[in-house]
Amino acid sequence: MVDNVRSLYNVGSIFRSSDGALIEKLFLVGFTPHPPRKEIDKTALGATRTVPWEFHKDPMEAIARLKKERIKICVLELAAESKPYFQLKKEDFPLCLVVGNEITGVSKEIMQEADIAIEIPMFGNKQSLNVAVAFGIVVYDCVRVLTAPH
């Protein structure tokens, strides 16, 4: 789920990573731009046609449906209860990974509905990564967890 991400290029990059990781569906919510947009297509390189997606102005519509389907809401956000992303386990799935706005992060209303909060440990002066880069790191680690033999 892409929550209030402003950059069309970040959205396109998230589509491309989603295709590579073979995610089931991408939810674009809030003011996140959605296809068709040439700026999204520029970085998505066709992934807008291969990744199933939905747009919801109100993210809580999608959250309610996911929770009804027993899909855990996993926010990628620095929070008091967040754990390193690489501590996710097979029993944490199925999950919906939520990434937030480039400046303000995941919205408070989604944070309140989160079942899991994860973070990418940062060791330098900066305390965050580009949203598309962070999504790529975590979504591919999810693939690692799900395809592990045990």
Image: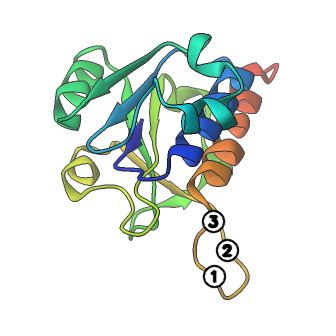
Q: Residue at x 17, y 27 (%)?
A: 61
- Depth check, front residue: 125 or 36: 36
Q: Secondary structure at mark 3?
A: loop
Q: Residue at x 29, y 45 (%)?
A: 31
**Quarter of the N terminus within the rendering:** top left
Task: Find residue 122 and name its label.
Answer: 2
On the rendered structure, is 129 left or right of 100? right
Q: Residue at x 61, y 45 (%)?
A: 135
Task: Tell which circle, 2 or 3, labels the residue nearer the N-terminal end.
Answer: 2
Judging by the rendered image, the residue that carries numbered circle 3 is 129
Density class for disc 2 (Cα within 10 Å; few <14, some 14-19, many ≥20) is few
Task: Find residue 126 and name its label.
Answer: 1
**Do tag 1 and tag 3 residues touch (Cβ < 8 Å)?**
yes
**Quarter of the C terminus within the rendering:** top right
Q: Amino acid at mark 3?
A: Leu
Density class for disc 1 (Cα within 10 Å; few <14, some 14-19, many ≥20) is few
